[in-house]
Structures are given as C-alpha cells and as structure tokens.
Amino acid sequence: MMSKKLFSALIFLLMVAQVSAQDIDKIITKDYVDGLIKTLSSDAMQGRATFTPGIDRAATFIEGEFKKIGLKPLTGLNSYRQTFYKYQVKPVNAAVTLNGKSIAAENILAVGNVAADLNFDNQTAGVVKLDTGKPFIPQYRAILSSNKQQIVLLDAKFAKYFSQLKERVKNGSYVDEKDLKSAEAMTTVFILTPETGATTFKVSLKNTIQKAPLFNVAGVIPGKSKSKEIVIFSGHYDHLGIIEAQGQDSIANGADDDASGTTAMIALAKYYKKLNNNERTLIFVAFTAEEIGGYGARYFSEQLNPEDVIAMFNIEMIGKESKFGKNTAFITGYDKSDFGKILQKNLQGSPFTFHEDPYPQQNLFYRSDNATLASLGVPAHTISTDQIDTDKLYHSVGDEYSTLDTENILMTIKAIAKSAISIVKGVDTPSRIPKLAQ
C-alpha cells in the first residue's frame, strides 16, 4: 500500500501543478518577455561586449529587474553584482628582425605573452616552419600546446588564418594576476613571411597591462527546508559588441545569443518568487565574458561547493524553433544524468518535449557556461533550441529582436518553469555527472 507520507506528497505536487498552470500565464506574459529581450538587445546596449559601457548598462537593467522581483544578493554581497578582476594584456609594439631584415608590424602576431616587456632571440628560442602541405589548425594547436618560446614562420598560403588570429587578439588577452607572475608562460610569435628558415632573429615585445573589472549579476530566493541545496538558473548577458559593419549596421545585438536565455532566467526568477514554494535555494545569474573565455561562469562556480549544487539550468539561445519542431528544445549532455528525464516526466500531458543534443560534433556540453560545474560532477546542463549547424545569424549583426520567434521563447520558458518544479521543490534530485579528470 502507498504510505500516507508518499500519498500526501503526490497530492501536494498535483495541487502545485494546478496552481502553477493557473498562475504561469499571468506571471510570464508575452509582453513581459518581449520587453526584456527588446531592452537587452537594443542598440543602446551596443552589443554588450565585456569591458564596455554597453555591458554595464545591461547589468544595471538586470539588477533593476532583480530588485523589482525581490531577489536577495548572494551571501556576503550587498549588491547583485559579483565583481572579480582580470588583467588585460594589450600589445603596443612588436618588433622582429629575421635574418637581418625588419618585419612589418602587420606581419607579426605574438600569442601567450603576458609580460610588459619581453625580448628574446635565436640564442634562447626556437624556430618552426609550418608545413604548407598540412592543414593549419592542427599545426597551430600543436605549437601552442608545446608551450615553448619560439617563432613560427607562415607561408602566404596561411595568410587567411593569420588575419583571423590577428583580429581575434587585437584587444589583447585577459589573464589572472598569478599568470602575470608566472615564469612558465611561453610566447609564440607568428610571422607571415616568404622566408623558409631563420639563421638569426630578434624579438622585442611591449604590452600595456591594465586591471579590469568584470561582474556577474546574481540574485537569490532562499530555500526553506533544504536551504543548503542549490538550484541554479543562468544565461550569459555579454555578446560581441561593435564588430565589422554589414551595410550600415555594426552592432552585434545578440538577441538570440543570449538575450533570449538571460530573459528566460529573469522570467523564471519572477515566476518562482511569486510561487514562493521552493524548498531548495534558487540562484539566478547572468554571466559575463562567456564570449571571451567563459570567465564569469568559471569565477561564479569557484565560489561554490559543487556538492551543494543539485542542478544547473543554463539557458542559451532559445529564440527560434529547434530542429525537432514547435514546442521542443534540446538538452546538452542528456545522457550524462537523468536531469532530462526528470524534466520530461514533469511535462506529462504537455505538448512540449525535451530531446537529446542533435549536434554532438559541436561539443556544446563543454562549450557553454554549464561546463565548469558539469566537470565537477554537477548535473549542469544547457537548454537550447538553436539550429547551430545552419544558423546564419550566429555571431553576426543580424542577430536582432526582429529575427526571433517570440512565441517559441515564451513556450520554452514556461516549459522550463513547469519541468523544473520537482527539483525546485526538493522532490527530485538528478543523478551526478561523472567528474572530468583534473
């Protein structure tokens, strides 16, 4: 026979489901969701690039929403901003002589240099010539992983890749203070040149080094009977900022990537705060710097004991219909825990379905902000609807509000809200993910 305790729990969950169904359409409305996305992806935010006034404006907007909802700051903080720092190492001058001849600055690219001044020559460093008969990317990765002080000679055949790398690092690199003091960081200098060898060379590099603040925006709904257990809802609020113009437009607004996920996170905070029945503590966080290395999620994760985190719902790009059709989304790492099965169980009777990640070759599970906690064993998954293999607007100025399917966003947010309820209530606990070797 069913125990009274179990029977009572089932009755309670049925009552919660009924109340939730009635309330959700009033709490998470189309106008509310549209207003969030339109603001976050507006030109006023200038594409929300990390370290820009635009991302500061976006953070201020999210803080305002959290305050209206009534979230509390993270423990130990007196505001919603979780601030941390990186050091921007930006190239100022690079001078190279090769076989007695000076190399033009536009044909020089230094990677891995974290010193204000660095000088080396053929007495202390090596030289590599890339094989034009082999693909560039595998050779490039092998060279960087070798962590040697060296110069690399590139034939004109690799000019396209060289230009792409120059563009990627034009604003420098971002490192922790410990990296500035590390004697182990080696520098590789790529040189675009017809020379096939280097009898002699000299390298002189100068950088500016500036301490730069970053900030996640996070709010909390404290739990009741299981307050030490944490459930996280997240999305990254940064994007690319001002990029190469297409026509008259140079602002990469990032409406789908990831104003849509950040909007979902805020809407879920509003919903669960209204319900006020979470036994576990809920943290809602907008991550910074996902686009330049996932720094925000990494810092946030390092402040937590992963054993306290029961689940993480990371929401990334839900602005368009998935490849499975309407009322569907996919979950990265679906097979690594029973997280997805729990969500689907809670949607019984609903037209919405969750699916396994259809793009395993993209390695999405370890490419988004769930990755740090997932590697530590937390059932941390990303929910998305993006058709990443055919999405022509991804990382372009074309990713604007006008291109979104707002009904898809609304239905996906509501599906997450309903499907997460048993985890939020402390009834279900997803199985842990196997930890990655550190």
Image: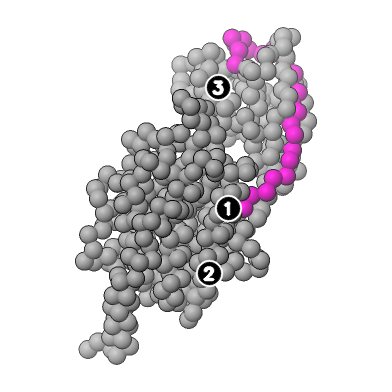
Dot 1 alpha-carbon crowd within 10 angstroms: few under 14, some 14 to 19, many 20 or more: many
Q: Amino acid at mark 3?
A: Phe
Confirm whether the magenta stretch covers residue 204.
yes
Q: Quadrant of residue 27?
A: bottom left
Picture mark count: 3
The disc label shown at residue 328, or none: none
Q: Is residue 238 above or below residue 224?
A: above
Q: Amino acid at mark 2?
A: Gly
From the image, tell me which residue sits under label 3.
162
Res. 320 visible in picture: yes
The disc label shown at residue 59, or none: 1
Res. 335 visible in picture: no
Which badge, 1 or 2, comes first in the chain's sequence?
1
Magenta: predominant secondary structure element? strand
Using residue 237 as the reference point, say whether residue 115 is left or right of it: right
At 49% from the left edge and 36% from the top edge, which residue is drawn? 252
At 38% from the left edge and 41% from the top edge, which residue is drawn? 402
Q: Is residue 150 above or below residue 427?
A: above
From the image, tell me which residue sits under label 2.
70
**Where's residue 65, x and y in %?**
52, 60
Query: Observer-nearest residue: 130 or 102?
Result: 102
Dot 2 alpha-carbon crowd within 10 angstroms: few under 14, some 14 to 19, many 20 or more: some
State if disc 3 and disc 1 touch (CB < 8 Å).
Answer: no
**Where's residue 244, x and y in %?**
52, 27
Q: CA distance from mark 2 to mark 3?
A: 49 Å
Q: CA distance from mark 1 to mark 3?
A: 35 Å
At 42% from the left edge and 63% from the top edge, which residue is drawn? 268
Which badge, 2 or 3, comes first in the chain's sequence?
2
Find the magenta span and give its range: 192-216
